[in-house]
Amino acid sequence: MAYRPEPDRDSRPWWERIARREFAVQECASCGTPRFPPRAFCPLCRTEGCRWREVAPVGTVESWIVNHQPFVPGRLDPYLVVMVRLEAVSGCLVYGNWRSERPPEHGERVVGTFTEVTEDLTVLDWAPAAAGGVHGHPSGRTSLQ
Ligand SMILES: [Zn+2]
C-alpha cells in the first residue's frame, strides 16, 4: 500500500494546488508571515486569515535527512527528505522528497518537480536546478523528463 497524504481543513488547498501543478505559499493575511506546512493560525501574530501567493518553486538546500526507518508504508529503502529555502519568499522553508541519484549539497540551487504518484495523487519533489536545464516558474510546469 502506497503512502497517501490525508488533506485536512488547512492543507487541502495546498494539495489541490499541487494536483493542478501550482506552487503557492500560504501567507498570513495580517503580517505576511509564510506558513509551511499550511496551518490555521499565524505562528507570529496568531491571525487566522491567510492568502496564497503563487511563486516559482525554486530555492536552495538548507538541510536534509536520510530516513532509514520505514516511516512510510511500502517505502523500505533509505530515502532522503530535503529542506529548501525558497528564493521568492524570504524565511520560508519547505520540504519534500529528494529527486537525484546523488545526495544534495548545502546551499545548492534546486527546483520543485511535480511527481504523479498515482492518477489522483501528485507530490512536489525537489531536484538539482542544473539537471537537464530544468527551470521552475510560477505556472509550475517543471519536469525532469
Ligand atoms: Zn501573522
Image: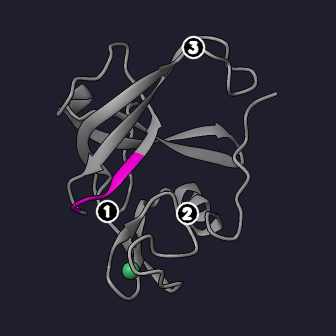
Which callout, 3 or 2, points at the residue further toward the start of the chain?
2
Please state which of residues 103 and 130 is positioned toward the viewer in this rendering: 103
| Mark 3–mark 2 distance (CA, rounded to whole Å) | 27 Å
Q: Nearer the viewer, mark 3 or mark 2?
A: 3
Q: Residue at x 23, y 35 (%)?
A: 129
Task: Report x, y in % for residue 91.
Answer: 25, 59
Q: Quick check: is 114 in the magenta stretch?
A: no
> In the image, what residue type sits under mark 1?
Pro
Ligand 1 found in image quarter: bottom left
Residue at mark 2: 14
**Of the residues under marks 3 and 1, which one precedes in the sequence?**
3
Q: Which of the colour schemes (rainbow, by chain, secondary structure, one colour) is used?
A: one colour
Mark 2: few, some, or many residues within 10 Å (few <14, many ≥20)? many
User: Tag 2 or tag 1, which sits nearer the N-term?
Assistant: 2
Image: magenta residue range? 90-94
Tag 3–tag 2 contact (CB < 8 Å): no
Can residue 89 be seen from the camera position used here? yes
Question: What residue is at 55 percent from the left and 63 percent from the top?
Answer: 14
